[in-house]
Amino acid sequence: MPRVGLIVNDGKELAVKTAKTFQKKLEDSGFEVVRVSSAGGLLGFTNPDQYMSSQGYNSCIPDGFDSSILFSVVLGGDGTVLSAARQTAPLGIPILTVNTGHLGFLAEAYLSDIDKIFKHLVARQWSIEKRTSLVVSVMRGDQCRWEALCLNEMALHREPMTSMCHFEISVGRHAPVDISADGVILSTPTGSTAYSLSAGGPVITPDCPVLQLTPVSPHSLASRALVFSNEEPVTVFPATPERLMMVVDGSAGCYVWPEDRVLIRKSDHPVKFIRLSDHEFFQVLRNKLGWGLPHVAKPDKT
């Protein structure tokens, strides 16, 4: 009997209610279901007064999950998808994202599509889209003090954010750069439509093999977002005497001290999204963010 996963945001009543329906339908279709909570992928934030020990990103893999899992259905919003990515990517398990949240930018299907979903799952008619993920590590000397997988972005800033910080950033073999700003964001193409977009960064299509460095409110007319190859490792050295706060995908993070450095590199484990139909990215931008809609003042051709 093929084994499948079911990752549920147990904090949302609609997701829990929907999970019961999905589990029964999957079992009736001949699948063995391993149900887990998406909370297992929520790393939270490290207490600054405690020693930050490194558990490695494999610590997010749920009990009962292994490489024999054919796929996993994810029920929740975009935050749940980011959490589920940490739980499944190390094992290479594809995820089918079903939105029970709000925006659902990362969703492949909706609750109104249940019949369509099961038709494709039972017939195993789907394609896989791979999205770049990152490994974010906080290093002190040769010691890794904290580590996590990242699908969207890593943001580094001071508490509160209204104070300017100084950063020395090294991208691969290139000359290091100095940035003075409220913070910096290092994002994947998937994350280019999230925090980085709000900070003025460009939208990058998911198939581009690049990363993006975006300053947050830079104190310079010359500091702009930079796009470069995702094969280039990035090291961020805080040049500010106070501790900084690092946030990964909005739900994980820790404090970074002046003697630490943040190492970001492309992960060997891309996040695999199940696509039931053609996933046209420009259409997603149009539907979710209103990109490219006809302007009300567009002149009539006549």
Image (cartoon, grey):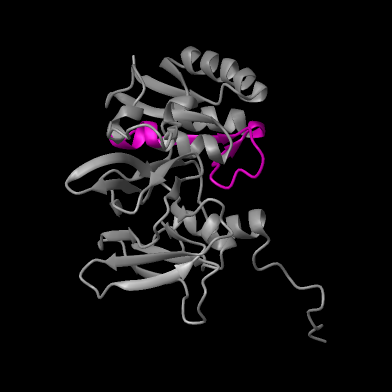
Q: Position of residue 293 (x, y in %)?
A: 70, 67
Q: Which of the pair 24/137 is nearer the observer?
A: 137
- Residue in the image at 46% along x and 71% along y: 225
* Left or right placement of residue 63 versus residue 296 in this view: left
Name the outermost residue toward the bottom: 302
Q: Which of the pair 159/18 is nearer the observer?
A: 159
Above or below, comparing residue 129 to residue 85 in the picture:
below
Q: Quadrant of the N terminus?
A: top left
Total residue callouts: 0
- Residue in the image at 57% along x and 21% along y: 10
Would residue 128 be visible to someone looking at this image? no
* Left or right placement of residue 267 versus residue 247 in this view: left
Q: Position of residue 157 (x, y in %)?
A: 48, 55
**Would you say residue 212 sits in the magenta stretch?**
no
Would residue 161 be visible to someone looking at this image? yes
Name the outermost residue toward the front: 241
Q: Position of residue 253 (x, y in %)?
A: 43, 41
- Residue in the image at 44% along x and 54% along y: 156
**Would you say residue 89 sits in the magenta stretch?**
yes
What is the quadrant of residue 127 in the picture? top left
Above or below, comparing residue 202 to residue 222 in the picture:
above
Q: Which of the pair 230/274 is nearer the observer?
A: 230
Above or below, comparing residue 118 to residue 262 in the picture:
above
Q: Quadrant of the C terminus?
A: bottom right
Per the rendered image, the range of residues in magenta is: 86-112
Above or below, comparing residue 235 to residue 81 in the picture:
below
Q: Position of residue 63 (x, y in %)?
A: 34, 17
- Residue in the image at 32% along x and 35% along y: 52
Name the outermost residue toward the left: 142
* Left or right placement of residue 279 versus residue 71 in this view: right
Q: Which of the pair 51/252 is nearer the observer?
A: 51
